[in-house]
Amino acid sequence: NDSINTTEPNPLVQNNNTKDSLSTALQVAILLPFKLEMAGADKNADKFIDFYRGILLAVDKAKKQGISSLLYVYDTGASEERIDSLLKKEDLKNVDLIIGPAYTNQIQKVTDFAKLHQIYTVIPFSQKVKDIDTNPYIIQFNSPQQTQINITKNKLIAKIQNIPIVLAYFENNQDEGNSFANALLAECLVNNKPYSRHFITEQNADSICQLAINQNAVLLLASSNQERVKPILRIINRHRLGTNLELIGFDNWGLSLLNESRPIYFSSLFNPNSISSRKYKEEYEKYFGVANNAYPNFDQLGYDLMCNMIEMLKNKNTDELHFPSLNNVQSDMDFRKITSNGGWINEHIYLIHLE
C-alpha cells in the first residue's frame, strides 16, 4: 500500500471534522520515502519518520489555534515509477500543499504536477531543483549552493571586516569548501582585502597556522569534507592552543568536530544553539518518547517548515503568497521569489560563531 493511514485514532492527527468543516481544513500531501517495506533496515527512513513527527506536532499546534489540517501521507520509496503511480491519485489534485519528495530523481515529476494543478510544493531537502525560475509553485528550503555561498560570504566579510584571511586549500579538491574559498578570494581581490593563499598538508599545517597567528588573521580550511580536514585540524588545534587564532569551517564537519575547533565560524540553515528547542522537545517527548539531539534535527525541520506553511496557507483564498516571520525552533526562514514568474528560495542562513 502506497499510503499511510492517518484516519485511525491519533491524538495529533484527528481533526474532529464534520463534513462541512472539511472544506475549510488545510489539505496537505506528504510525499516521503518512509520505505515501509524496509522498516528498521534503512537509517534514512528513520530521518523521514522524524521529519513527519515534527509535521504532526505543527499540525497539533495549529489545531489548538483553531486551524484544522487534513494530511494525505504517502510512502514514495526511491523510484520514479512509484511517484508516477502516486500522481495518478485523485486526492492529490485538490490539496493545498505538497511536502516532498526527498530524492532528486523524483522532484521534477512532482513539481510539473504541482504547476499543472497550481499546488504549492515544498522541497525540503534537495539543493538541486529544476525549473524553479519558471515554476511559481516551488518553495525550496535548502537553497542552492551558490546562493548559500554568496550569503555566507557577505555575512562573514561584514563580521571580520579587514582582518586578513589565510586561505588554506587542499590539493585536488572541488567540494563546497573549495568553492567558498574561491568566492572569498574574489571578494578580497575586488575590494583590496588582505589575504594570502596556500596549499595545506599535514607536513606544513603547523607553519601555515603560525603564519595566520603572526598576521592576526582568520584561517579558512577550504574543504567541507570531514575526513579530509580531520588530520589537519588535529595539528592546527594543537598548534594554536593559547592563541587568539579563529578558524572558518563548514557545518558538514559535524557539530562535535566544530566544537572541538573553537573559536570557529561556520554557516548553516540550522541553529545549534536554539533557545526555543527545549520547550519543543518537551512537547515531542509527550507523544514520541525521548527526543534525539542530532544536528541537524529532522523532526525540528519538519515542525518549523509545517508551522511556516500553515501560517502561509491559512488565508488560502488569497492570490498572493505571504510568508510569516516566525520565531522557529531550529531554522528561521526567509523565502524570496527568485524571478517574477519563478518559485521561492529560502535565503535565511545563520553565520554561527562558536567561541
Image: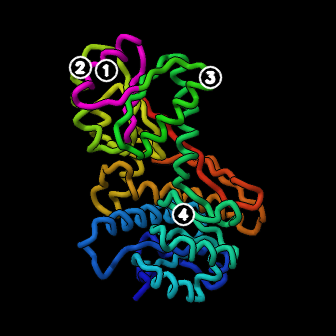
> Upstream in the sequence, badge 3 or badge 1?
3
Answer yes or no: do the residues labelled 3 and 4 have beta carbons within 8 Å?
Answer: no
Query: Is 198 positioned to the left or the right of 180 in the image?
Result: left
- Residue for point 47% across, 80% down: 80
Residue 286, how many percent across, how many down? Answer: 34, 59
Q: Which residue is mark 1?
A: 209
Query: Is 110 positioned to the left or the right of 14 in the image?
Result: right
Answer yes or no: do the residues labelled 3 and 1 have beta carbons within 8 Å?
Answer: no
Residue 135, how many percent across, how many down? Answer: 69, 66
> Upstream in the sequence, badge 4 or badge 1?
4
Other-residue count near label 4 (Cα within 10 Å), few / some / many at <14 / 14–19 / ≥20 = many
Query: Is 343 positioned to the left or the right of 32 in the image?
Result: right
Q: Which residue is mark 4?
A: 123
Task: Give the SS element for disc 2.
Answer: helix
- Indicate yes or no whether the magenta region holds residue 285: no
- Residue for point 58% across, 25% down: 189
- Which amino acid is tagged 2? His
Residue 150, how many percent across, how many down? Answer: 57, 39
- Residue for point 38% across, 50% down: 296
**Range of magenta residues:** 198-223
Tell me how far mark 3 sits from mark 1, CA to CA: 25 Å
- Indicate yes or no whether the magenta region holds residue 205: yes
Tell me how far mark 2 sits from mark 4, CA to CA: 43 Å
Looking at the image, residue 186 lies above or below residue 45: above
Q: Which residue is mark 3?
A: 191
Answer yes or no: do the residues labelled 2 and 1 have beta carbons within 8 Å?
Answer: yes
Mark 3 or 2, which is nearer the eye?
Answer: 3
Query: Is 99 positioned to the left or the right of 170 in the image?
Result: right
Q: Nearer the viewer, residue 127 or 5?
A: 127
- Which amino acid is tagged 4? Ile
- Which amino acid is tagged 3? Asn
Q: Which residue is mark 2?
A: 239
